[in-house]
Image: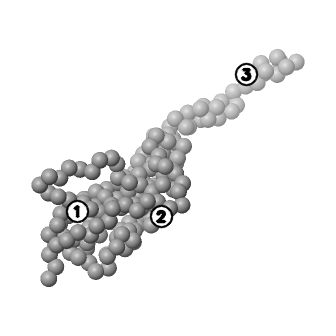
């Protein structure tokens, strides 16, 4: 009796398209999901770099409202329009550069560790007039689709999220 039911089920042709769609739909949808995640990562990276350029322009000209690391973080987060939780996930380093014998700092840009309640203070030195400065940012970002495509293969930082980093050099303008 069971064999007869199985044979009649195997011979039926209604629902044939359902099986085909169920098997092929993920394979067809995967490239679109990968492209969407890639687009969002690129958009966030571009917005962070744009915000860094705007804030560094103010910083270079000696804006009075950017007088501490927290004020610099706040100014950057005000310019980055599409990042939620920016103040909590942003870490920065600002240090003077000795031009004749400069060598890049070793290692990666320091990022926030979400698993820790407090993160270590990084270098923040506003520098003097006409001094070359290096500024590096690291902003953690959570993928939109963490289990598919790019969100699955991007390297995670401690505590989750992947790092969007940016760095720049500028010279402090002389103040009057």
> How crowded is the residue under tag 1: few (<14 C-alpha within 10 Å), some, or many (20+)?
many
- Left or right: residue 94 versus residue 29 is left
Q: Identify the residue under disc 1.
A: 96
Residue at the spot of label 3:
10
Q: Residue at x 43, y 59 (%)?
A: 120
- Name the element at disc 2: helix
* Residue 43 position in % (x across, y down): 37, 56
Which residue is at a point 26% across and 78% down the rendered structure image? 63
Front-lying residue, 26 or 19? 26
Q: How is the image coloured?
A: one colour
Q: Closer to the N terminus: mark 3 or mark 1?
A: 3
**Residue 46 lies in what quarter of the image?**
bottom left
Q: Whole-Å distance between the Cαs marked 3 and 2?
A: 57 Å
> Furthest-left residue in view?
100
- Position of 54 with respect to 15 (left or right) is left
Which of label 3 and label 2 is nearer to you?
2
Q: Position of residue 162 (x, y in %)?
A: 44, 50
- Looking at the figure, which quarter contains the N terminus? top right
Residue 88's disc is 2
């Amino acid at each position: 009796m069971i064999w007869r039911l199985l044979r009649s089920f195997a011979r039926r042709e209604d629902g044939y398209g359902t099986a085909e769609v169920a098997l092929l739909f993920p394979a067809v949808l995967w490239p679109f999901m990968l492209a969407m995640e890639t687009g969002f990562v690129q958009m966030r990276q571009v917005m962070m770099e744009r915000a860094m350029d705007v804030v560094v322009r103010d910083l270079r000209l000696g804006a009075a409202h950017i007088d501490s690391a927290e004020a610099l973080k706040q100014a950057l987060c005000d310019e980055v329009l599409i990042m939620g939780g920016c103040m909590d996930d942003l870490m920065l380093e600002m240090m003077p550069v000795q031009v004749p014998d400069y060598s890049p700092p070793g290692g990666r840009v320091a990022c926030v560790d979400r698993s820790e309640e407090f993160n270590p203070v990084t270098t923040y030195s506003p520098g003097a007039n006409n001094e070359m400065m290096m500024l590096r940012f690291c902003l953690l970002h959570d993928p939109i689709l963490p289990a598919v495509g790019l969100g699955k293969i991007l390297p995670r930082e401690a505590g989750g999220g992947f790092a969007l980093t940016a760095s720049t050099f500028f010279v402090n303008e002389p103040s009057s």
